[in-house]
Amino acid sequence: MAELEKPRLGVAMIGHAFMGRVHSQAWRSASRFFDLPMEPQMRVLVGRDAQRSKQAAQRLGWVESATDWRRVLERKDVDLIDICTPGDTHAEIAAAALEAGKHVLVEKPMANSVAEAQRMNDAAHRARAQGIHAMVGFTYRRVPALKLAQELIAEGRIGEVRQVRAQYLQDWLGDETAPLSWRLDKARAGSGALGDIGAHIVDLTCFLTGQRFAGVSGMLDTIVAERPVAAAAAVAAGGIGGGSGGLRGGPGASAEASGTAATGPVTVDDAALVTARLSSGAPVILEASRFAWGRKNALRIEVSGSRGAVSFDFEDMNVLHYYDATQPARTAGFTRIMATEPEHPYLEAWWPAGHGLGYEHGFTHQVVDLVRGIAAGKDPRPSFEDGLHVQRVLEAVERSSGAAHQWTEIHDHERR
Ligand code: SOE
């Protein structure tokens, strides 16, 4: 008897830059490595420019391309909208897609404000009654070593959560002549390091501990307030030293050096420093910066408990360090777990022990969990409710860093 055809899941992806490329890899690979209850169909890639979208669709494996996402919502052969665009478009597209009866996967951060995230969550709540599901793309939850950490904490292996410390450090803005981009424009991105990479460690803190944030105190800093407009930077690079401009694009390439003084304001934070408390009262310290020279994608998180600790660094992403505080002091130390055994989360589908996974595998696991959630009629996590909480934390940090911030001056010369 012919094998029963699996139900198909027609997918449309909006946006085809970095996130569009890695999401396409996930849609292409998920059903080839995992048994899925539905067969994803990469139906249409949507972009603003017709020619570039057509080229991207062919290159990334999408059947068609389009330029009008609203028209795509009318298609009966599209069941899910994958939103890979800048944050200022997430709310409008997600709300319209959910109202059109389409499942939604939206890249992080979920939105550019709590108000937008609330609108999205309300739309998801209404759509859920029709069996429609929505998920936010916090993919680091799906790195096997971090999923293992979450399981160990949930099993009580480190006891009560006592403290969390997390950093997310990159250095692509350390070069002061690196040009403006949409990520440095508050109207497009909502915030800078805080929402772009800080959102990940806020979500991961909730994921690993099973708790939410009760309160924060934060400091946001814009380290370089003016940057070359992209075209000027390109001219500058072409003018002196070549390359992409800036320190890494060749010696001395800078807008000023070539006389093209076209610059614009950076309207977002470059670094976010946060102290916080979880619902249990456990203290948390978070740092997100895109100025940390030499740190390329250094997401680090460590959870200390009453009986031990877990520690992770994305730049060694197949490893989880586990400390059992009950072991005899003489031989105590962090155990270096290579999270590549078939027993580890998601690994049964991949390579033999020790061969390791990469950044893109978390996106494939995201598709696997999303498709399985849809087939099971269950909202996959992180849900829009989870994403709304992250947005609340980000907004609280912004408020705290602003006028409300309790900053205590230090006067060395002061005599009591
Ligand atoms: C920022 O550079 C960035 O691309 C984030 O936007 C992604 O969410 C993260 O996965 C990698 O770094």
Image (cartoon, rainbow, N blue to C red):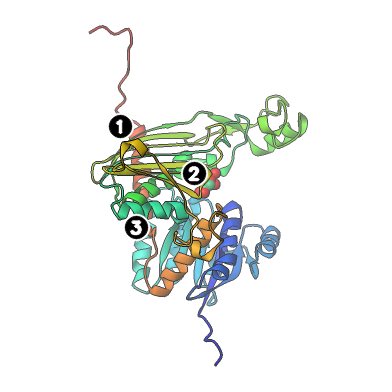
Q: Position of residue 406 (x, y in %)?
A: 29, 28
Tell me residue 56's x, y (percent).
67, 60
Identify the residue position indicated by label 3 in the image: 385
Callout 3 amino acid: Glu
Q: Nearer the viewer, residue 363 or 396?
A: 363
Is the residue under label 2 in contact with that under label 1 (CB below 8 Å)? no
Where's the N terminus, which quadrant? bottom right
Q: Which residue is mark 1?
A: 404
Mark found first going from the N terminus, 3 or 1 = 3
Q: Marks 3 and 1: which is nearer the front? A: 3
The residue to which callout 2 is attached is 187
Q: Nearer the viewer, residue 346 or 383?
A: 346
Q: Nearer the viewer, mark 2 or mark 3?
A: 3
Give the residue displayed 32% in from the left and 51% down from the top.
Answer: 153
Q: Answer above or below: position of 108 versus 347.
A: above
Q: Which of the 4 image quarters holds residue 322?
A: top left
Answer whether residue 93 is visible to the viewer in this image.
no
Disc 2/disc 3 C-alpha distance (Å): 23 Å
Q: Quadrant of the C terminus?
A: top left
Q: Specify the quadrant of the image occupied by residue 400.
A: top left
Mark 3 vs mark 1, CA separation in Å: 26 Å
